[in-house]
Amino acid sequence: MDYLEGLILIAKDNKEILFIIGILLTFLESFFPVIPLFAIVVLNSALLGFTKGIIASIIGSCTGTFIIYTLAMKFRETLFKNYNNEKMDKITSWIKKQGYIVIFFCYSIIFIPSFLISICAGFSRISKSVFIPSMICGKTMLFLIGSYIGYDLEEFFRSPKKIIVVVVVFLLSFIVAKVINRKIN
């Protein structure tokens, strides 16, 4: 236990390096979905503080996610030029039709790999003007929840009020996303 406390003290003394590491880890998660994003977000918040933890997580994750989306858009034709599948066309057209809500909702849920969402959005040719805000809002919602939990982890599990706050914030964010989607369309 003393070893872990020592590492935490060293880490807290080197916040700039931690900030860069936090960005890099969330960036890498975009390409390697086996890295536990939510754990990184909680750790960023615990070590960097609530605000800096969220900022580091958003910068790294959104940058990596946008690169994956751009690559999927660019290489869609190359990968599928000899592959004509009705199911795929149906799925991609449904994703494109739903747009903002689907992307926002998927990015704000921890259990759906952002790698797959980015590829599906790129293959569906969702415009950048829809993809970027919905991705940023969805990830920000997930990171706010993760940072809220990570900022005071022990207190979170002791207080049912905090759990209720997380559920309410998620529901409110979904309602706001629907309103924004209506205005975009």
Image (cartoon, rainbow, N blue to C red):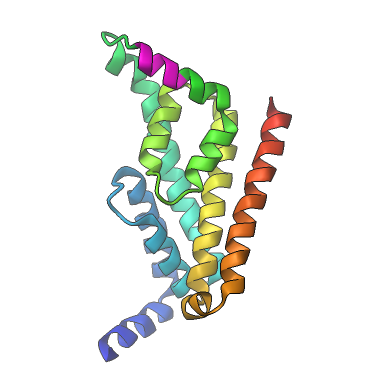
Q: Is residue 29 left or right of residue 102?
A: left
In the rendered image, residue 54 lying in the magenta stretch gets the answer no
Q: Residue at x 48, y 18 (%)?
A: 93
Expressed as whole percent of the image width and height from the top left, the position of residue 39 reads 38, 63
Q: Is residue 56 left or right of residue 29?
A: right
Expressed as whole percent of the image width and height from the top left, the position of residue 92 reads 44, 21
Most frequent secondary structure within the magenta stretch: helix
Expressed as whole percent of the image width and height from the top left, the position of residue 55 reads 53, 59
Q: Nearer the viewer, residue 23 or 40?
A: 40
In the rendered image, residue 91 lying in the magenta stretch gets the answer yes
- Magenta residues span 86-92
Q: Residue at x 51, y 65 (%)?
A: 147
Q: Residue at x 28, y 91 (%)?
A: 2
In the displayed orientation, state which residue is furthest to the bottom. Answer: 2
Q: Nearer the viewer, residue 65 or 110?
A: 110
Seen in the picture, residue 118 relative to 110 is either above or below; the reply is: above
Quarter placement of the N terminus: bottom left
